[in-house]
Image (tube, grey):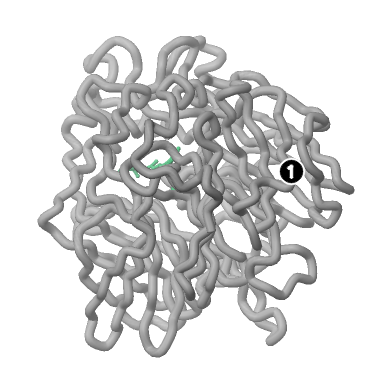
Amino acid sequence: LPSPQNTEVNAAPSFDMDDWRSGYRSQPEEFAYWIDDIEGTIPAELEGTLFRNGPGLLDIHGHRLKHPFDGDGMISSIAFKEGRAYYRNRFVRTEGYVAEQAAGKPLYRGVFGTQKPGGWWANLFDLKLKNIANTHVIYWGGKLLALWEAAEPHRLDPATLATLGLDNLDGLLEPGDAFAAHPKIDPGHPEQGQEPRLVNFSIKTGLSSTIRIHEFAPSGDRVKSYQRSIPGFAFMHDCMITPNYVIFFQNPVSFNPFPFILGFKGAGECVEFNPQAKTNIILIPRHGDGPLKSIEAPAGFVFHHANAFEQDGQVFVDSIVYQDFPSLDEGMTFKDVDFSHVPEGQLWRFALDLEAETSKATCLIDRGCEFPALHPAHVGQTYRYLYIGAVHSSQGNAPLQALLKRDLVTGDEQLWSEAPRGFMGEPVFVPRPQSQAEDDGWLLVLTYNAARRCSDVLILDARDITSGPIARLKLQHHVPYGLHGSFVSE
Ligand code: 3ON
Ligand code: FE
């Protein structure tokens, strides 16, 4: 049960706008040090490295970005060994980062509306994309890869975070090809000799959209690729897997490229949500060359999926749904955002009947939430525990300040809040070695502590998050609010 300090509803705002904004200052510096300011104890059994990605710069030599998703990717690593932790961060040396840092000014437009200085004339017909490598960081087949969904991955040295260059995945990707930022790792069944697989996709969109899927063995070798086409435009940030399907949400959005081409708007600002239309849930078979299934669901905008599984002939998908595509008003930058005027994400469960081709949607968490996590052995499988960043109050929209654990069987919830001055990031669940219970492990999360104007790394016992972190590692600086990351135990 939530502790009393966490249950206030409709009280004063749980945060201060200047506090929140201060977590979006650029962090141009690169650090490497043993973390020595620690409250509590790092579990000795916790061994491995947490890698995080997100925008490190919110301005380019004083030119402010319009949106944080346009910020250059900066990787943090926190390596845990024998009860100690080592912090390091480095920018991904993308072509654009290197060129702009040398030029001392923006040379590219951003997908989310950041423009080159000089007005529309200076942006007219400039359709090149800056691969900012800022969305996710994964380790697979011996490679550490920084991902951005509209271009190729960058390979990094896991020990130093030095950029080794663009990685075409052993010739799979042509220059400029996309590789989405949300691969899913199918845990397989190691006890039955069925090894894990990494499943990821790329999408080519226009009047119709082609989704290309790749599956990779733990060695990094590609096992297979397959593709299917669907009518209409598609903006798909994430996917979900089950043993038999790769699942996508074709959100009811259209794309009018002209303001982008003419230099007025970023490509992402040309995405328009149509609440009268339906979402199409697309299921692409992972085995054989059967047709895809497309099942309608109510309109909503989904960036992230929590999980999916097959049970009793049905497929269930748990996703974070927004009632509109989040966008900024004309002339606004993200720092002016009025949280009460943008929709919050809520967790919905979609039950899909593949025979009848129908869906039923149920809201599971109506508190604003984003950045789901679960035990990695349950990806694509039935699961009981979901962990997710959440807003402090049970109603309304606000920045993420809390961590929520939901028991999907009983409906019980636990909450830990860092409000009023702390802000939550994406949790990562790390199973305790040799553990049996699904929630026997730790939640690792990088938070921002506005009181110190610095970031903290929290370690929580996932079985009981209500008593707060078992260790709080206080960084010597801040890391701007980030996106996604992975824990690597080898
Ligand atoms: O036609 C396409 C339209 C489009 C939007 C062309 C395209 C492929 C270039 C394109 C590009 C999409 C890209 C590059 C998307 C990148 C997304 C990104 C970096 C992050 C998305 C984050 C989503 C969420 C929900 C983050 C939430 C954050 C918090 C709650 C807290 O900070
Ligand atoms: Fe994402």
Residue 46, compared with residue 314, is above or below; it is above
Counting from the top left corner in percent of width and height, residue 146 is at 58, 43
232 or 182: which is nearer to us?
182
Question: Measured from the top left, where is residue 274 in percent x and y?
Answer: 15, 50
Residue lying at 42% horizontally and 75% vertically, measured from the top left: 245
Can you name the residue that lies furthest to the right here?
82
Compared to 70, does 317 lie above or below?
Answer: below
Q: Position of residue 34 (x, y in %)?
A: 83, 31
Residue 349 higher or lower than 41, as above or below: below
| Residue 182 visible in image | no
Measuring 49% from the left and 55% from the top, which residue is drawn there?
372
Mark 1 lies on a secondary structure that is strand
Amino acid type of the residue tagged 1 in the rendering: Ala
Residue bearing mark 1: 471
274 versus 375 height, above or below: above
Q: Is 434 placed left or right of 428 in the picture?
A: right
The reply to whether residue 414 is in sight is: yes
How many other residues sit within 10 Å of disc 1, few (<14), some (14-19) or many (≥20)?
Answer: some
How many marks do you count on the picture? 1
Residue 170 position, x and y percent, is: 61, 55
Residue 187 quadrant: bottom right
The residue furthest left is 276
The answer to whether 87 appears left or right of 268 in the picture is right
